[in-house]
Amino acid sequence: MDSWFSIFPRNKWLSIYVWIIFCLLPFFFIFRSSSPLEILIGITLMLLYFLSYMFSYKAKNGLVYMWVSFEIVINIVMTLLFGYVYLAIFTAFFIGNIRNPAGFYIIYGLHIAFTVGAIVAGFFIEIDLFLPQIHFILVSVLGTVLLPFNLYYRNKQINLEGQLEHANERISELVVLEERERISRDLHDILGQKLSLIGLKSDLAGKLIFRDPKTAEKELQDIRQTASTALREVRELVADIRAAKLENELVRAKQMLQAAEMELIIEGNPSFGQIPAIIESVLSMCLKEAVTNMVKHSRGTACRIKFEQLPNEYVLSVEDNGIGIVRGGKLEPGSGLRGMRERLEFVNGSLHVEGEEGTKLTIRVPVVLTHIMKEVD
């Protein structure tokens, strides 16, 4: 049953305190009875209930429904004998974490029907026991109705988020595979034909070197020129592989944000004029890291990406309307900001973070690097 649900909600400390109260409260109702036999029956029922709850947590497949049925029966008996309705909330919490839709709706309907039926019967049997706590009973019934749906759809959302993350990882793998196939095709097209040509001309030059030296020399010059052309094209291919494009990364960012149901607002033009390939690659990797972290951690509904080319620097900012990442002046771990700063150090760039209301990352890279690279070329 571990794969079907988690036994406590996300706010575990609050849940533990509430659970302790609900575990101790039934004994107040039990010891309120004057009959030793009723007290013994009440204690026995509580022990049986918690044993059933434990077994239902560990149960597999259809056995879980049997244990939940025992819990519902014990809840009915406790309601009728002692006026203790609140075990229904325990059972409602468990039902809300059942992942099977058919099982969830069947058990959910039965639980509500039997709980309401036991309360109505209790009013007819002993109204003085139920009337003083009518307000708490109504709250318990409301919790019994709403809690399972809340937990069911929360678990469903968690499952969908996991599937989305898995799908994004799969898409990344497919993109890498497609890129490898493209590189393989390009290398075959670039080198295959030219190496074959070099081989043929080498054989021809070998045959002509003594018979017609001038023609052989011309063939050797063609071989040299063909080899130079092949080398240049291979260098261009490698440079294209290494250089990530901001426009391409922006397309992938749009896809990821759309899958996460986040609105995207783009300001400026990602096609910076005369930007060096290394700077564009660093900015692309930073954009990828920023959007990935935003989707995973921000819990926001909108993202703003701004491209700005100033006289002295390139500026890229990524902003969301989520929960923010600054807590007490320190950045939360796992944000990936360290890797972004390490990349920016190579191009003398900087990263500024604002994270109190939403998160805003501002990346700045100086344009002076462009002039340095031109001089090196």
Image (spheres, rainbow, N blue to C red):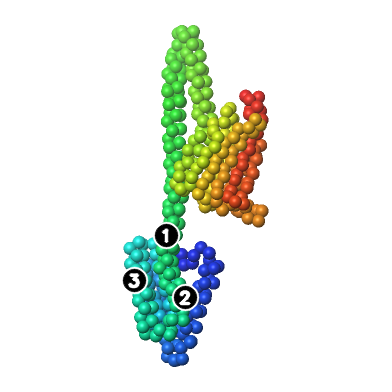
- Report crowding for label 2: few under 14, some 14 to 19, many 20 or more residues within 10 A (C-alpha): few
Total numbered badges shown on the rendered structure: 3
Q: CA distance from mark 1 to mark 3?
A: 19 Å
The amino acid type of the residue labelled 2 equals Phe
Disc 1 designates what residue?
A: 153
Asked whether the beta carbons under mark 2 and mark 1 sit within 8 Å of each other, the answer is: no
Q: Secondary structure at mark 3?
A: helix
Asked whether the beta carbons under mark 3 and mark 2 sit within 8 Å of each other, the answer is: no
Q: Where residue 368 sits: x, y (%)?
A: 66, 30
In-front residue for pair 121/365: 121
Residue 179 visible in the shown view: yes
Q: CA distance from mark 2 to mark 1?
A: 26 Å
The amino acid type of the residue labelled 3 equals Leu
Q: Where residue 146 sits: x, y (%)?
A: 42, 66
Task: Please state which of the two labelled residues, at mark 3 or mark 2, is closer to the viewer.
Answer: 2
The amino acid type of the residue labelled 1 equals Tyr
Disc 2 designates what residue?
A: 136
User: What's the residue at 39%, 64% (across, down)?
Assistant: 98
Whether 7 is drawn above or below 323: the answer is: below
- Residue 197, located in which quarter of the rendered image? top left
In-front residue for pair 107/114: 114
